[in-house]
Structures are given as structure tokens and as C-alpha cells.
Image: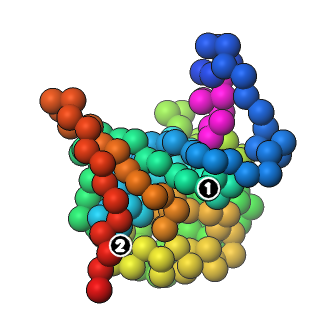
Amino acid sequence: ATSEATSSRASSLGIPLVSIDEVEALDLCIDGADEIDPLINVVKGRGGALLHEKLVAARAARLVIIASAEKLVSKLGTRLPLPVEIVPFGHTHTQRAIAAIGITPTLRLTTDGSPFVSDGRHYILDCETHGIADPDGMARTLKAITGVVDHGLFVGMASIALTVDDAGAITEHHAVVRS
């Protein structure tokens, strides 16, 4: 399962699961997304399981995204903040380092005001980007910051996205090749 919530739900329905450590590879991963751009790059992780989601997606031969049509954007980072998973130790220094690259990170908090803890037992920074012109470059820059575990950018990982509109119509999206 890509998250503790999905694992719990599957178990409650009697759906058998295996640990990601028990498989070499997956033929297919089907998951949702928070944003989808025309190249089928996606932002995931608003639920706090982005590292687990990325580990599963990276093991899959194909990643298929299923989402509502409202998740389609011309540029990632325009609809919602980009989640970035960081280690708790020294998190304020990591937050400042992320701010230094020109985005605005905010520590995600729970309703009681304590830091939200991800499925991977890390903190999440919700980063306002006001649009990501170069998702691959942003992904590399974030990963190079000490204290960053991972980020919600899934660049070049999805092969197809299926979206459904308010009328229930399903549309298949393939990456647009830019010359």
C-alpha cells in the first residue's frame, strides 16, 4: 500500500497486502495525484505519505494516475503548495535553506498545533511555489538540500493519467512531447 491509510482501509475490507520489501518489482501502480501537468508530471503527498508513494511508484513498471479533472494544471505548483518531507532534527535550518531557493515553506501542523508527522515519521513543509517552471530542476534542487528526505514532485514517473469530470466522463491523458 502507498500509505498507512490505504493499508488500513484494505485490511478492513479483507484485501491481502504484501510489504514493498517482499517484491522485486511491480507491473503496475495506480494512485491519485494533487496536480497533473501536460507532461503527466504530478504532485503527490498532500496526505502525508509522499515518500511511501514514491517508493512504490519507483518499483512499478507503469504508474497510472487517476484523479478528478480539477487536478489538471498548466504548471505544477499553481493549485496547492508542494509538500516536502524533511527530517525533524534541524528542521528550522532545512526550512530556511528551502526558503533560500525562492519558495515559501510552511511547517504543516496538526489541529492541536504540533508538527504533522508523515507516514515515514518525518515533518512536512508545504511550499508555495507560485508555479514550477522546471519540475525536474526543482526536484534536483530540493533533493540536494541537507535535511530533505523527498518531495512531492513525481517527474517523468507516470505514463498515463485518467481524469473524470463532474459529468462522469473519463479522459485519458498522455504526456505532451515538447520540441
Label located before the other in sequence (2 or 1): 1
Q: Quadrant of the N terminus?
A: top right
- Mark 1: which secondary structure? strand
The residue that label 1 is drawn on is 61
Q: Which residue does the image show at 15% across and 30% down from the upper left?
A: 167
The residue that label 2 is drawn on is 132
Side of 76 where 148 appears, left or right: right
Report the front residue among 17 and 52.
17
Q: Which residue does the image show at 41% across and 68% down from the upper left?
A: 104
Task: Evaluate whether residue 62 shows in this view.
Answer: yes
Report the front residue among 173 and 142.
173
Residue 6 falls within the magenta-colored stretch: yes
Using the numbered discs, state the Cα–Cα distance from disc 2 to disc 1 in whole angstroms: 26 Å
Q: Position of residue 127 (x, y in %)?
A: 44, 62
The structure's colour scheme is: rainbow
- Relative to 96, say whether 24 is above or below: above
Q: Quadrant of the C terminus?
A: bottom left
Residue projecting furthest to the right: 22
Side of 34 where 144 appears, left or right: right
User: Which amino acid type is marked by label 2?
Assistant: Ile
User: Which amino acid type is marked by label 1?
Assistant: Ala
Report the front residue among 30 and 118.
30
- Relative to 67, say whether 96 is above or below: below
Residue projecting furthest to the left: 167
- Relative to 24, say whether 101 is above or below: below
Q: Position of residue 8 (x, y in %)?
A: 65, 23
The residue range painted magenta reads 1-8
